[in-house]
Each structure stands twice: as structure tokens, then as C-alpha cells.
């Protein structure tokens, strides 16, 4: 059962980390569904290490696809490192505050259901927004902060990090490909920082029923492979302006989760 569950969550993580439908939101819903049908305890809430491992798998997918951009950051495009630092600050502040004061709400299916339709509206904006002509290397620091403020909404379950940052990039005049590239370069410190924060929490609080190394390796491998496919798919769909189906999916799923949670409460 552990392997089935980790493969299931690895697929969910790999698909939703890059496709702009909110990986955290879908993991919350997937956890709740798995628990409802199996009667088993929630894996990602009980074992923080699983969440970290799944995210590290998708982080590796970003590094594989954008390795040339990362290499340029360390050689020719060092100014972009400053832009990434500035763009990461708002999300880091908000993420720490949410983790400290509102941690229990970040795994709430009802909140996720309420936020998923909002994410759908963001995706409709992306598909209809005419792109600019600016490359991400030409970003100013104020515009990087604006994109960073968009990313600050990403810790909320149901709000897509890639969706908000790409929308922010288009809003400040980036080309579609440049908005996507800057979005996923921003993901490197964002995911790495969340992983470090999770490891610190893991060391200080500990965790019960730690999955085996084999289970964790399978989860990381699945999220990595599926992440590679979904990231390439997103880049193709973004170029062609075909994100509407994801928008309607988020809206429909959000409404369904709300109805489901209200039925559990009042049914």
C-alpha cells in the first residue's frame, strides 16, 4: 500500500508542480481522497519528509530542462541572480508567516476548494493577455518584486506558483517564453528554501512512521519523470495559448471539493 500511495502522490506532484493547477492544492485533495477511501492516515501531513522528497524530484526536473539557463546565471547573466533574490523575498516572508501562524489551514480541503477557482481565473488571464517584448534578463528590480509578490500567493493551497508568476511576468511586459523561464528559475530558490525549511522542522519536531528509503526513492523518481513530461507540455501549451482547459479544470474541481466538504459537514 505504501508504494501504491507514494506512486500516486508522485504522479500528482509531478503533473501539478508545473502544469499551472497548484501542486499543493492537488496533493491536499489527493490526500483527503486517499484517506476517505482507504481509511488510512494522511501521508504528506504525517510524514513531512515525503513532501520534501516529492518536491526535490520536481526540482531536479527544472534543473535538467533549464541547465543552460542556470549555467548562464553563474557566468554571463549574474545580474539575474539579484533579480531572483529580490523576487524570492516576498514569497519567503509570506511562507514563513503562513507556516508559523496558519499551518493547519494549509492542508484544509475546503480552503483549497475555494482557492482553485481563483487559480482558474488567473489562467484565463494568462491565455488572454497579450505578451510583451521584454526578456527576463532585461527585467528591472521593481518588476522582479512585482513577480515575486505574485509568487507570494503560491503557498496557499489551490493557487499555482507557476500560474501566478507567469501571470505576473506577462503583466510587467515579458514575452511568454521569458515569463515561463523566469518563473521556473524562481522555482529553484523557492522549492529549495521550502525543502530546507521542511528539513529544519523535521529535525526539530521529528516524524512518526518514516517511510523506507525505497519508498522515498520511488516517489522522487516518479515525481521527477512525470515532472519532466509536464514541464515540457506546459511550455508547449503556453506558447500556443492553450491553458483554458486547466482553468476550467481548476474551477470545476474547486466547486466539486467545496460541495464535497459541505456535504461532509452538513450531510
Image (tube, rainbow, N blue to C red):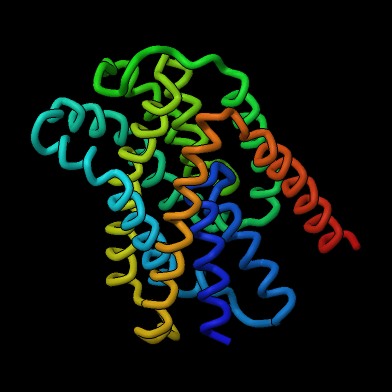
**Does residue 182 lie above or below 66 as drawn?**
above
Q: For the point 54% across and 52% down, which residue is it?
A: 16
Q: For the point 30% across and 23% down, which residue is it?
A: 136
Of residues 159 and 127, the one drawn nearer to the viewer in this rendering: 127
Of residues 137 and 114, the one drawn nearer to the viewer in this rendering: 137
Where residue 76 appears, x then y in whole percent? Answer: 10, 29
Residue 193 visible? The answer is no
Q: For the point 43% across and 35% down, which residue is it?
A: 152
Where residue 86 appears, x then y in whole percent? Answer: 26, 29
Count up the numbered dots.
0
Q: Quadrant of residue 180?
A: top left
Q: Quadrant of residue 121?
A: top right
Where residue 111 appears, x then y in whole percent? Answer: 66, 48
User: Going by the image, does 122 lie left or right of 134?
Assistant: right
User: Going by the image, does 1 lie left or right of 257?
Assistant: left
Q: Quadrant of residue 227?
A: bottom left
Is the N terminus in the top left, top right, bottom left or bottom right quadrant? bottom right
Where residue 142 appears, x then y in whole percent? Answer: 31, 16
Q: For the point 43% across and 65% down, which residue is it?
A: 51
Most extreme residue toward the right is 267
User: Going by the image, does 11 lie left or right of 255?
Assistant: left
Amino acid at each position: 500500500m505504501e508504494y501504491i500511495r507514494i506512486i500516486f502522490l508522485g504522479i500528482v506532484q509531478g503533473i501539478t508542480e508545473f502544469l499551472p493547477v497548484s501542486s499543493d492544492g492537488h496533493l491536499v485533495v489527493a490526500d483527503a481522497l486517499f484517506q476517505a477511501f482507504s481509511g488510512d492516515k494522511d501521508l504528506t501531513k504525517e510524514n513531512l519528509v515525503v513532501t520534501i522528497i516529492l518536491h526535490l524530484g520536481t526540482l531536479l526536473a527544472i534543473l535538467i530542462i533549464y541547465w543552460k539557463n542556470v549555467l548562464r546565471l553563474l557566468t554571463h547573466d549574474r545580474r539575474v541572480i539579484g533579480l531572483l533574490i529580490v523576487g524570492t523575498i516576498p514569497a519567503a516572508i509570506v511562507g514563513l508567516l503562513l507556516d508559523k501562524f496558519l499551518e493547519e489551514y494549509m492542508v484544509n480541503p475546503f480552503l483549497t476548494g475555494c482557492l482553485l477557482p481563483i487559480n482558474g481565473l488567473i489562467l484565463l488571464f494568462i491565455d488572454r493577455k497579450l505578451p510583451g517584448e521584454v526578456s527576463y534578463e532585461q527585467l528591472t528590480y521593481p518588476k522582479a518584486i512585482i513577480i515575486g509578490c505574485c509568487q507570494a500567493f503560491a503557498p496557499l493551497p489551490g493557487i499555482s506558483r507557476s500560474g501566478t508568476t507567469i501571470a505576473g511576468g506577462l503583466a510587467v511586459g515579458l514575452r511568454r517564453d521569458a515569463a515561463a523561464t523566469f518563473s521556473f528559475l524562481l522555482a529553484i530558490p523557492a522549492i529549495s528554501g521550502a525543502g530546507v525549511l521542511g528539513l529544519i522542522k523535521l529535525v526539530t519536531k521529528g516524524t512518526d512512521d518514516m517511510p523506507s528509503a525505497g519508498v522515498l526513492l520511488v516517489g522522487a523518481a516518479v515525481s521527477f519523470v512525470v515532472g519532466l513530461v509536464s514541464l515540457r507540455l506546459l511550455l508547449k501549451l503556453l506558447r500556443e495559448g492553450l491553458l483554458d482547459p486547466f482553468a476550467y479544470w481548476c474551477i470545476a474541481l474547486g466547486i466539486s471539493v467545496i460541495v464535497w466538504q459541505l456535504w461532509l459537514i452538513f450531510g
